[in-house]
């Protein structure tokens, strides 16, 4: 195994598209984060758009952040999340980075986020590690219903965080999927193992979950860092029942289509679970008056799951990322 106590070169990247205010907040948090000892860090913004609309936002922050980390920009005009992710990976490999980290452009990182993430890497044998996502605090401008949905989302994230803390370790995720909202991987995954984000899944989402599954299938060690936090800013348009239902619909549709391609038997079992999902939906509706801070999103996501899965025989295919939300 590679000696992890040696100095490391790290690329911290985000993929952005038409969210300059959120991107500026992320870059600001990058400038405040502590840098891990014995590491050189550069931050990289990959804009996935037809034109360099966010380059000025990046340049305004300067080539060097207040904490001494570098800041670079790249434009990837081939639209689609996997193209942007792969561009970041190629940039990291070409730069000679040992590690590539991903966060989303609608997040901010905790001051000790990278320090804890790299400490987790150094204390593990994993080549791919994930960490928790939390919801940012409300801004105060939300409506009553939006605040209710935000509490639901926050509770959902905390439930996932607690479940991961019980199941996962630095050397085993316990089945917890590692996604790119909080992600650390060795660049050797790309340059030596030949793993890349699937560019055939241009707008569907789910390429990070597939990358994780392929890493596990290749027999490569994966792990979980329980205390390296990022915080998602959730814009008002995502705090609606219908947006959350649509997200559940498209995520289940993409996940089930991947199972149909790779593990048809498990996909059939997924279809057969539909009656249980219907019962779960009914139970959530009945419990909603007593647990509104948890059940609203369960109703939305379960209803979306049913539509996404049952829509497959009728030709429905997710296009979740064609529309940009945020600011």
Image (spheres, grey):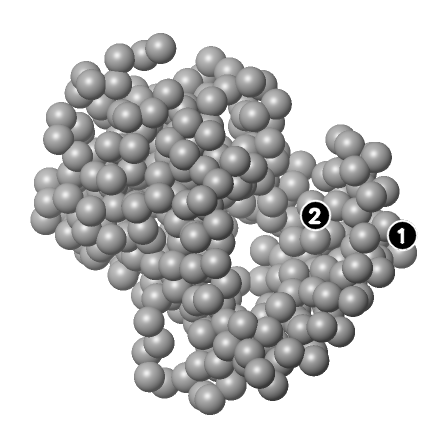
Q: Is residue 4 above or below residue 208?
A: above
- In the rendered structure, find residue 254 and report the number of the disc placed on it: 2
Q: Quadrant of residue 280?
A: bottom right
Residue depicted at 76% across the width and 31% down the height: 262
Secondary structure under the numbered disc 2 in the rendered image: helix
Residue lying furthest right = 313
- In the rendered structure, find residue 313 and report the number of the disc placed on it: 1
Secondary structure under the numbered disc 1 in the rendered image: helix
Residue depicted at 50% across the width and 63% down the height: 156
Could one spot residue 91 in this view of the protein?
A: no
Q: From the image, which quarter does the C terminus lie in?
A: bottom left
Q: Residues within 10 Å of mark 2 (few under 14, many from 20)?
A: many
Residue 27 in the image: state x and y as whole percent: 25, 53
Is disc 2 in contact with disc 1, using a CB cutoff of under 8 Å?
no
Q: Is residue 256 left or right of residue 179?
A: right
Residue depicted at 79% across the width and 47% down the height: 270
Q: Is residue 231 above or below residue 150?
A: above
Nearer-the-camera pick, 206 or 37: 37
Q: From the image, which quarter does the N terminus lie in?
A: top left
Nearer-the-camera pick, 138 or 203: 138
Residue 208 in the image: state x and y as whole percent: 54, 40
Residue depicted at 20% across the width and 18% down the height: 5
């Amino acid at each position: 195994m590679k000696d992890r106590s040696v100095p490391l070169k790290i690329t911290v990247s985000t993929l952005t598209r038409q969210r300059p205010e959120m991107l500026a907040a992320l870059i600001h948090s990058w400038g405040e984060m502590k840098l891990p000892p014995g590491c050189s860090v550069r931050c990289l913004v990959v804009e996935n758009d037809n034109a360099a609309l966010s380059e000025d936002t990046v340049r305004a922050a300067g080539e060097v952040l207040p904490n001494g980390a570098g800041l670079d920009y790249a434009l990837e005009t081939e639209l689609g999340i996997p193209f942007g992710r792969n561009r970041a990976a190629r940039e990291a490999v070409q730069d000679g980075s040992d590690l590539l980290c991903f966060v989303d452009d609608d997040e901010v990182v905790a001051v000790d986020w990278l320090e804890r993430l790299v400490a987790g890497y150094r204390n593990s044998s994993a080549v791919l590690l994930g960490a928790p996502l939390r919801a940012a605090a409300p801004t105060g401008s939300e409506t009553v219903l939006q605040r209710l949905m935000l509490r639901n989302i926050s509770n959902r994230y905390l439930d996932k965080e607690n479940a991961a803390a019980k199941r996962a370790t630095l050397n085993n995720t316990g089945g917890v999927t590692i996604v790119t909202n909080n992600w650390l991987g060795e660049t050797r995954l790309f340059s030596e193992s030949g793993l890349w984000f699937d560019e055939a899944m241009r707008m569907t989402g789910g390429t990070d979950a597939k990358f994780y599954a392929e890493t596990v299938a290749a027999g490569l060690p994966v792990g979980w860092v329980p205390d390296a936090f990022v915080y998602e800013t959730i814009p008002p348009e995502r705090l609606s029942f219908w947006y959350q239902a649509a997200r559940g619909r498209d995520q289940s549709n993409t996940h089930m289509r991947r199972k149909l391609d790779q593990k048809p038997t498990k996909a059939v079992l997924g279809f057969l679970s539909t009656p249980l999902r219907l019962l779960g939906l009914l139970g959530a509706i009945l419990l909603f008056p007593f647990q509104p801070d948890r059940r609203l999103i369960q109703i939305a996501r379960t209803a979306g799951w049913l539509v996404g899965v049952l829509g497959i025989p009728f030709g429905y295919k997710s296009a979740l990322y064609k529309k940009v939300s945020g600011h």
